[in-house]
Amino acid sequence: MIEALIDGERRGQVLADLAIGRMRAAGKLADLSMALTGRFTEHHALLCRLHQDRIAGFDAAVAGLDERIAGKVIRWQREQDLLTSVPGFGDVVAQAWPGEIGPAPHLHFATHEKLASWVTLCPGNNISARKRKHGRTGDAGTYIKPMLVQAAWAAIRVRGRLQARYNRLVRRFGGDKNPAAKKKAITAIAHTLLKIAYQVLKNGTPYTDLGADSCTRRESPEQKQAWLERQLQKLHPGCAITITISSPEAALTPRPLTPHP
């Protein structure tokens, strides 16, 4: 529409016919035609052309930088493929990761917790008189942290584990109508994406989504039993665990008291 205005078209109906997408819905074209009928002089067209030329120049500069960056990261193509398997990680985030953190973060950070602390995506520790107060993230990670937050917004648009986790955190932090709850939840999702990317690069295997019901399955009796068995194995390595399931009636039967001598 702007290009048509610059080229000299002034008829509102003709300009409205250039609309695309939702603007072509029933009832909108008539309103759009009325909105486009007005005073638009050659001076306005000149100003629009100047703005369009500047935008085109910036787009060309960005495209040139993208091409140069793509040439620099081509030697880490394997890591690029692994990172793009993470939800929300597009080419821009996957290319920024080697530049900000490196293609092998596990060689410089022993755990993903240390990496999250370095990027300052972990909650602040503000405790006084044994009372935990509000803690905010730090100011480090100037370039990679905003990209991870942007990737988090893209990741929660896809049905899966991350979307379910985001909805659960929003409810816990104050509800869908609370903007602060959404900000806290999206920061937590960015932290989760950082941990996923760390593990993906460390293990060398693409990311596999666990599904939207992963938390429900994790809280099932079978999962709790498996977790308890793993804890016992940690306490007593190599021990044999035997599970005997008794009826509820037998468990509730009181045991006779044995008098002490």
Image (spheres, helix red, strand yellow):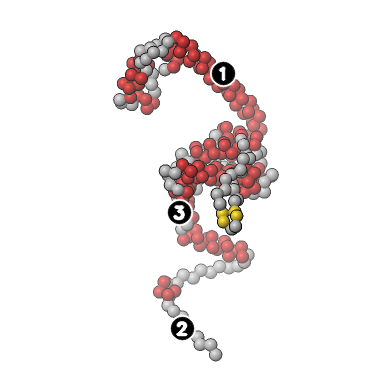
Nearer to me, 166 or 216: 166
Q: Residue at x 44, y 79 (%)?
A: 254
Q: Which residue is mark 2?
A: 256
Q: Secondary structure at mark 3?
A: helix
Nearer to me, 204 or 128: 128
Q: Is residue 255 visible?
A: yes
Q: Amino acid at mark 1?
A: Gly
First reached walking from the N terminus: tag 1 or tag 2 = 1
- Is residue 248 depicted above or below 151 in this figure? below
The number of numbered discs placed on residues in the rendered structure image is 3
Most extreme residue toward the bottom is 261
Q: Which residue is mark 1?
A: 57
Task: State how far apart marks 3 and 2 are (Cα).
Answer: 40 Å
The picture quadrant where one finds residue 95 is top right
Q: Is residue 27 left or right of residue 112?
A: left
Q: Secondary structure at mark 2?
A: loop
Q: Which residue is mark 3?
A: 216
Residue 144 is situated, as x and y percent measured from the top left of the image, at 60, 37
Q: Is residue 207 left or right of residue 25?
A: right
Q: Is residue 162 visible?
A: no
The picture quadrant where one finds residue 142 is top right
- Is residue 165 depicted above or below 48 in this figure? below
Task: State how far apart marks 1 and 2 are (Cα).
Answer: 89 Å
Q: Amino acid at mark 3?
A: Thr
Q: Amino acid at mark 2?
A: Pro
